[in-house]
Amino acid sequence: MPGAMLNLEEAWRADPAILPAIAASCMIVSDILARHDEPQRRYHGHNHLRSLVELITVHAPHILPGAPPRLAIWWHDAIYNPAARDNGERSADLARDHLSRLGASPEQIEATAGLILMTKNHWSGPSAGDGDFFLDADIAILGAPPRAYAAYAAGVREEYAWAPADAYRTGRASFLSAAMLRSCLFRTDVFEATYAGQARANMNCELEALSAPGKGSASSTLPVSGFPTALGRGRFTAPRCRR
């Protein structure tokens, strides 16, 4: 996985630079970064933004600044209340507002908002073209080295501190179990080849920990749709890998 030393302000400048109303850029990026520094965030913060920018740069260098898959990075978690169910919709609306103020075209705005809405379930729906790289980057943490994955899992649990322990373990285990059944974890070949093997090892290790004695039952039945884990929102559908 890429490192986390990227300067976000510098990375941001490349994306709105092609948009007409560049004067609004400083105010908007300040708002975005302030949102990602909110106290309820443990995983979904600045480092998550850095990771996505770096992953797209490394694995999809053909995606140019200002393209919807890059623009979507900045707004996809801009609204983040772990107890809410409309974060995706509200984040997409914020992206529409900000991009309109930046002078983006209607096509750019709706393509970006559409990708943000697809993060409600990264595996649902047809191929999004180059947007598939963005969707894969958003869940690439599943295939991080074990210590980084453990930090992610702990961070997500802290974000859901409001949830009862048994309910959280059940919902999280339901998501992990369903993900493990997939023939493909990622939409693109490059992410599948690079991260899927480690992702399966990480998730299997977490599942074992969740079902260990004293950790509560990981097999009781709480529908994932009734408990929105960080990466387990909505229905599970057949994976679509780009070939």
Image (cartoon, rainbow, N blue to C red):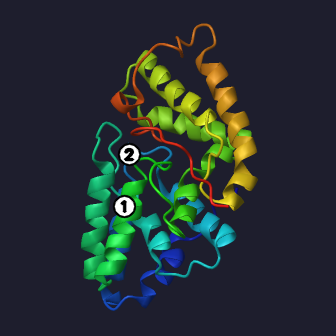
Q: Residues within 10 Å of mark 1 (few under 14, many from 20)?
A: few
**Which element carries disc 2, helix, strand or loop?**
loop
Q: Find residue 39 and name its label.
A: 2
> Amino acid under label 2?
Pro
Q: Residues within 10 Å of mark 2 (few under 14, many from 20)?
A: few
Q: Position of residue 96 (x, y in %)?
A: 27, 70
Give the quarter of the image for residue 100. bottom left
Q: Position of residue 209 (x, y in %)?
A: 64, 20
Q: Determine the residue positioned at 50% across, 58% down.
A: 46
Give the quarter of the image for residue 99. bottom left
Q: Determine the residue positioned at 57% across, 56% down.
A: 136
- In the displayed image of the protein, which residue is found farthest to the bottom? 20
Q: Is residue 20 visible?
A: yes
Q: Position of residue 22 (x, y in %)?
A: 35, 88
Q: Is residue 36 visible?
A: no
**Which element carries disc 1, helix, strand or loop?**
helix
The correct choice, above or below, for 219 with respect to 108 in the image is: above
Q: Determine the residue positioned at 44% across, 88% down.
A: 17
Does 123 sit left or right of 78 as displayed? right
The correct choice, above or below, for 190 with respect to 212 in the image is: below
Q: Find residue 89 and name its label.
A: none
Q: Determine the residue positioned at 29% across, 41% down.
A: 85
Task: Give the CA distance from mark 2 to mark 1.
Answer: 10 Å
> Amino acid under label 1?
Ala
Dot placed on the residue nearer the N-terminal end, 2 or 1: 1
Question: Of 207 and 128, which appears nearest the observer?
Answer: 128
Question: Of 4 and 216, which appears nearest the observer?
Answer: 216
Does 171 sit left or right of 110 as displayed? right
User: Circle 1 sits on which residue?
Assistant: 34
The correct choice, above or below, for 54 with respect to 172 in the image is: below
For the C terminus, which image quadrant?
bottom right
